[in-house]
């Protein structure tokens, strides 16, 4: 795994692209921070659940479901920040053997692929969320939360990821190798 430095802003970006990029970066950072806070929440819930179950013989009902739902939010909100920072996984065997021009094309293709995935995920997530809301579906188990609320993670994550991929794509276009 290698960090992708192409995610950083180019100094010569046009003003609108720079503003879009700054806004997208800020949104991705907020998603990353929320994701990190949710990781701490998962840790706290897990500690409390273990202590209650094994030391107090009083299990915390719904803890497993809460952790599972939080994990979805963690991944979906953190994906855009990982993309922005270049922390995504790439197979470097081919990439490292390419020249700068082919690397640029591969990076462009990668960002387009992520953008396409984000659009499909967002549309599917939206339809799923609206279906669950229309039929008043609730999660199984002790929590019994409205499913549409839990499925917002898909839509929010797709929006953040799509925005991060779009800005990375535009930054790559601004720095096309000659």
Image (cartoon, helix red, strand yellow):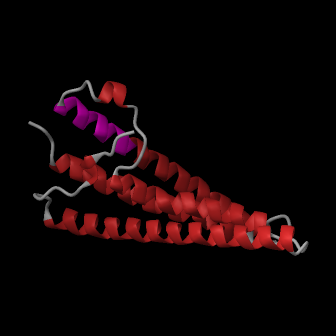
User: Magenta span: helix, strand or loop, mainly?
Assistant: helix
Q: Position of residue 165 (x, y in %)?
A: 36, 52
Task: Please tell me which residue lies in front, 66 or 110.
Answer: 66
Q: Where, by quadrant of the figure, is residue 162 drawn?
A: bottom left
Q: Position of residue 31 (x, y in %)?
A: 46, 67
State the residue at coordinates (15%, 42%).
176
Instruction: Residue lying at the far right in this picture: please name it.
Output: 57
State the residue at coordinates (67%, 58%).
128
Q: Position of residue 70 (x, y in %)?
A: 64, 65
For the question of whether residue 136 can be seen, the reply is no
Q: Would you say residue 166 sits in the magenta stretch?
A: no
State the residue at coordinates (52%, 65%).
156
Which residues lie in the magenta part?
A: 100-112
State the residue at coordinates (39%, 68%).
29
Q: Where, by quadrant of the figure, is residue 166 drawn?
A: bottom left
Task: Please tell me which residue lies in front, 119 or 177.
Answer: 177
Q: Position of residue 63 (x, y in %)?
A: 77, 69
Task: Please tell me which residue lies in front, 100 or 117.
Answer: 100
């Amino acid at each position: 795994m290698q960090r992708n430095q192409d995610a950083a802003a180019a100094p010569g970006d046009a003003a609108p692209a720079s503003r879009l990029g700054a806004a997208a970066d800020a949104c991705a950072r907020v998603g990353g921070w929320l994701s990190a806070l949710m990781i701490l929440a998962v840790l706290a819930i897990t500690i409390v659940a273990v202590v209650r179950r094994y030391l107090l013989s009083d299990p915390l009902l719904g803890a497993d479901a809460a952790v599972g739902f939080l994990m979805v939010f963690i991944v979906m909100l953190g994906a855009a920040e990982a993309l922005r920072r270049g922390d995504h996984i790439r197979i470097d065997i081919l990439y490292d053997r390419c020249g700068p021009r082919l690397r640029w094309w591969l990076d462009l293709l990668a960002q387009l692929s992520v953008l396409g995935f984000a659009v499909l995920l967002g549309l599917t997530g939206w339809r799923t969320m609206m279906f669950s809301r229309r039929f008043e579906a609730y999660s199984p188990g002790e929590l019994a939360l409205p499913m549409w609320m839990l499925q917002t993670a898909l839509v929010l994550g797709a929006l953040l990821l799509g925005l991060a991929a779009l800005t990375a794509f535009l930054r790559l276009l601004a720095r096309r190798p000659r």
